[in-house]
Amino acid sequence: MGQLSGPTDPTADAHWENAQSRKGFFTDTSICIGCKACEVACKEWNHNPQDGNLELLESSYDNTGALGASTWRHVAFVEQGRERIVEARESGRALVNLGMPRVGPPAAAAEMTANLAEADTTPPDTADFRWLMSSDVCKHCTHAGCLDVCPTGALFRTEFGTVVVQDDVCNGCGTCVAGCPFGVIERRRDGTVAVAAEREDRHAEHPAVPNVGIAQKCTLCYDRLVADETPSCAKACPTTSIKFGDHDDMVETARERVAALHEQGLTEARLYGANELDGVGGTGSVFLLLDEPEVYGLPPDPKVPTADLPRMYRRAGSAVAGMVAAAALAFVRGRA
């Protein structure tokens, strides 16, 4: 088990001899068109079965509903009217503050600030209706609860800083399911085949086996990463809504995109998962959102359950020490 909280580098924590730079996604929901190409590409590459009979849900134009054991990428559809859009814009102003850079001596900075104060910063007309579409995926957390609580070592941290489940080691206990603050990981219960470890011509040589009860989630296409290939979902995205690369580069790209949208008056734009001081130490999958996280089904303040372990151990130790002291005192008094 690695560090449980605070800023850290998960690739270094894994102690790989050939550790690589941490990889991750930047999902820009502002340009997602809801085509679900990422969902299809993910299922195709990983040999995941379809979910249900592909009929539309009664609550949405979506047909898969949420991330699960067979859906490692899920595109959500959220409808919003004028009132909610206005509220989102106001909440974005309150939550995101990129600050105002100062250039040159104090006098020049003051003059620049005065000029900006006179500029027209009225946001563009608010639309009457909009779709919020977002491709969700495993967050590959810096402090991964699923990884910390796994009793068999089935989950491991790769040399790219991602988190992967080993099908042949998982015993299906489900502890990781409870340990994920995002509800990402699930156990497959329908007896469908496991994710194939070999590709194409080797499938017949190494047939997959039933995996009832085995935990499943996104691997960030680990088999493609080791071959220096882009994950299938990012490869298939037609609008580049899903970007892939070094984690630090993805965070920087995300911040630049938020700043650009703010300049256009879209003040509801905000980042999710880019704060290394949050309850999971930041995530490998960073998102640009156009409303509060709850709208997308994301926890506003995620926290890995194992972060409280040191404090729990200290309190348990204090309690044990107190009980021992009380017992010793009672024994001494009893002999007096």
Image (tube, rainbow, N blue to C red):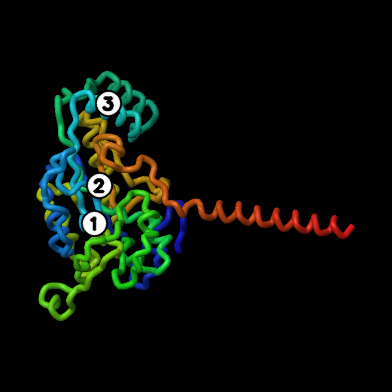
Q: Estimate the x, y position of residue 318 in percent, counting from the top left.
A: 65, 53
Eyeballing the image, is 112 above or below 48? above
Name the residue furthest top.
Answer: 118
- Residue closest to the eye, 88 or 275: 88
Q: Quadrant of residue 119?
A: top left
The label on residue 253 is: 2
Name the residue furthest right.
Answer: 336
Eyeballing the image, is 148 above or below 99? below
- Please give the name of the residue rendered at 44% of the width and 52% of the height, measured from the top-left corner: 305
Eyeballing the image, is 210 above or below 48? below
- Residue closest to the eye, 317 or 330: 330
Check whether the beta carbons of the residues at disc 1 and disc 2 lie within 8 A of each other. Answer: yes
- Please give the name of the residue rendered at 26% of the width and 61% of the height, measured from the top-left corner: 189
- Mark 1: which amino acid? Gly
Q: Estimate the x, y position of residue 49 in percent, counting from the top left.
A: 16, 60
- Please give the name of the residue rendered at 35% of the width and 54% of the height, measured from the top-left corner: 141
